[in-house]
Structure formats: C-alpha cells, structure tokens
Image: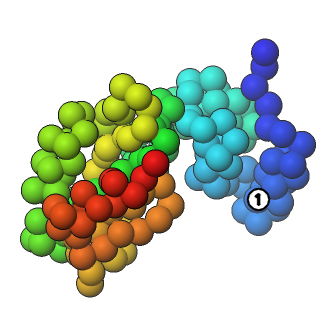
Amino acid sequence: MTMEFSPENKKKLAEILSRYPTKQAALLPTLWLAQGEFGFISQETMEYVAGLLDISPAHVYGVVTFYTMFHRKPPGKYNLQVCRTLSCALRGSESLLDHLKKKLGIGENETTPDGKFSLCTVECLASCGTAPAMMVNQKYFENLDASKVDEILNGLK
Ligand code: FES
C-alpha cells in the first residue's frame, strides 16, 4: 500500500505550504504532520515527504535524525523526554535519568517490552526556571526528583 496523508491532512498540508515561501521551507511542519498521522517517521514516510516537497530523501533523513522530537521507531504509549541541558543538568537531570533507566529496565532511546514507556533525553524544554524538567508525550513535569518521578509513573496506566 502506498503511503498517503488522509484527506484532512492533505488540506492541512496545503494550508502549511501556503504560509511558506518555498515547499522546502515547510519540511519541519510537514514532518510533524506526518508523525501525527503515522505515529513515527519511517523510511517510507521520509520518502513520501521528500516527494511532496521536492527535496531529496537524504535531506529529510538529516533533519529527522537531528531533531529528537521525531521518532524513527514507534515510541511507547508514554514517551518520557528528560531535559539534559544546563539548568536541568545542574539540578540533577542525570540522576533522574539513571533512576528512570533502573526503574524501567531500559536505556536511552529504548522502549519497555510491553510498549508502555520510551525513554530519551532532549535539549532545553524552555522550563529552566523549574528545572529539572521532563515531558511525557505533550505534557510538562517540573521541579522533579526521584519520588515525583515515581508518582508520575504510577499515575500512568
Ligand atoms: S535546561 Fe532544562 S528546561 Fe531548560
């Protein structure tokens, strides 16, 4: 089956393209739209997007692998994204990450065997004043410590 956006996302893409001076400039929002629809950015998705925007699949690959917000494999139901940038690092993000690794039994960029949790590190989440911070899918959690992280995990079904 050939990959294709839903009719609704085709409309959204047309809207996105109308806001950019060139098709190529719309790569990031187009990838975001694709991840929303297909769940992650597979090789096939990269080729589809490259074709839509008249750019090379290699260029799309370079962008997808640069930004941590794009998943190249299906993520777990809950994608835990721990900030590793300065303010969070100074306030203990590394030990939070270790805590999560031990607790979930997975390393960075891995998913638990039941598909429930994925773990990764990301650059500044713009929440430096309340460091350390992490996001679970699209939701922010701040001023974290190990016991808060445990509470958060317990609340995720
Ligand atoms: S350094 Fe972690 S949110 Fe900015």
**Residue of label 1:** 16
Asked where in the image residue 107 lies, by quadrant, the reply is: top left
Query: In the image shown, does 125 or 149 lie closer to the viewer?
Result: 149
Residue at position x 61%, y 50% in the image? 32
Residue at position x 66%, y 36% in the image? 38
Residue 23, percent across and down?
A: 73, 50
Label 1 residue SS: helix
Report whether 35 appears left or right of 70. Answer: right
Report whether 64 appears left or right of 11. Answer: left
Residue 83, percent across and down?
A: 27, 61
Report whether 7 appears left or right of 114. Answer: right
Residue 142, percent across and down?
A: 30, 73
Q: Is mark 1 within 8 Å of ligand 1?
A: no
- Residue sitting at the far bottom: 129
Q: Is residue 31 above or below residue 155?
A: above
Q: Is the image coloured rainbow, by chain, by secondary structure, or in one colour?
A: rainbow
Number of marks in picture: 1
- Residue sitting at the far top: 1
Query: In the image shown, does 114 or 62 lie closer to the viewer?
Result: 114
Q: Can residue 122 be spotted in the picture?
A: no
Report whether 46 appears left or right of 13. Answer: left
Residue at position x 38%, y 41% in the image? 117
- Which quarter of the image is occupied by the N terminus? top right
Q: Amino acid at mark 1?
A: Ile
Residue 45, percent across and down?
A: 64, 30
Q: Can residue 102 be spotted in the picture?
A: yes
Residue at position x 16%, y 57% in the image? 96
Q: Is residue 6 above or below residue 154?
A: above
Within 10 angstroms of label 1, few (less than 14), some, or many (20 or more) residues? some
